[in-house]
Amino acid sequence: MPGKYLYLKAKCNLNRNTNLKPGNDKAGTWPLPERWQQVGQCTIKNTQPIMISFHLIRKNKTMKKIIVVGLVIICLFSCEKENNTDNSDFIDTLDLITDDCKTTIERSTICFDTVLTDSRCAAGANCKWEGNAIVSLDLTTHDNENYKVELNTNPDFSIDTTIGNIYILLTDLTPYPEISMVINPKDYKANLTIANLTTIENNAQILSFNPEKEACSWGWTIKIGNDTIKSDDVIIGKTVGYNRDYPVDIYLEKGDLEQACSEMGGYDYYKLKTMIKIE
């Protein structure tokens, strides 16, 4: 009911007080009982559970009542860089089918022209090497400069390239060949990661690589924020490699937990959503 509420004072964390009025439109909503209406919201840059106390003064013709409501809210906000919720200005992950084009970073346009050759070892076949597929792309920048790009699936060749400040990585090409299978050229789909190198910054470091093929041993040790994790994601081997000088600066988006090793004194393994080497 309009005019019934004087103000709402929300204590959002240890040292922040936020005065809100009915109808404030900010992220995060905690509705009160219907008779109170929706009196406000609070935006909190915190990834931990917090206690919020609302002090509501309700005006009445005969009296004033002070109602104190304690709410425990689990706030899972992702404003911190390592959680990476708003990275659209500097990184883009997209799928392109043959002859498809999409607008991406820096108002540039990327097109998937064709697969020039596909000699990847078919699933179920015995091959002396893994083979390779070459993807032909066409990049047009915002100032109408046009570039032909060829990227490979085999990391022994170029799987990524940089044109100006635009980084392009071929992360996958499907479908994968099978014995007695003929792939229609129109059926190919390329998965690309594109980044603006002038705005992206490293948020993690690869500290080392362990070649021992034992449980909780093999793979790369990565420092991200205050956490240390491990990963055996193939994209690291393709872009960073196995034998090199460490540490290596990277931009990383951590995915789901893959294997728990912390209880055995090691580091937990995670899948990677995105990883870009920062030179």
Image (tube, rainbow, N blue to C red):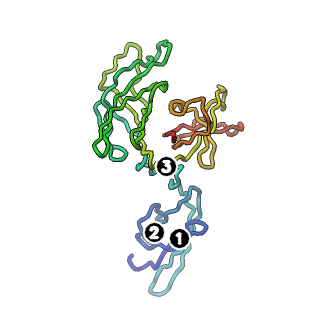
User: Mark 3: which amino acid?
Assistant: Asn
Which residue matches tag 2? 40
Q: Residue at x 56, y 58 (%)?
A: 46
Q: How many marks?
A: 3
Whether label 2 touches label 3, CB < 8 Å: no
Which residue matches tag 1? 10
- Across and down, in percent, residue 243 comes to 60, 29
- Across and down, in percent, residue 142 comes to 31, 46
Give the CA separation, mark 2 to mark 3. 27 Å
Q: Is residue 144 left or right of residue 254?
A: left
- Across and down, in percent, residue 250 comes to 54, 42
Q: Is residue 274 above or below residue 66?
A: above
In the rendered view of the protein, which quadrant contains the N terminus? Answer: bottom left
Q: Earlier in the sequence, mark 1 or mark 3?
A: 1
Q: Earlier in the sequence, mark 1 or mark 2?
A: 1
Q: Is residue 61 left or right of residue 211?
A: left
Whether label 1 touches label 3, CB < 8 Å: no
Q: Is residue 251 left or right of residue 146?
A: right
Callout 3: 10 Å neighbours few (<14), some, many (20+)?
Answer: some
User: Mark 2: which amino acid?
Assistant: Gly
Which residue matches tag 3? 84
Helix or strand or loop: what does disc 3 sit on? Answer: loop
Q: Is residue 56 left or right of residue 161?
A: right
Q: Residue at x 45, y 69 (%)?
A: 40
Q: Is residue 49 above or below residue 269?
A: below
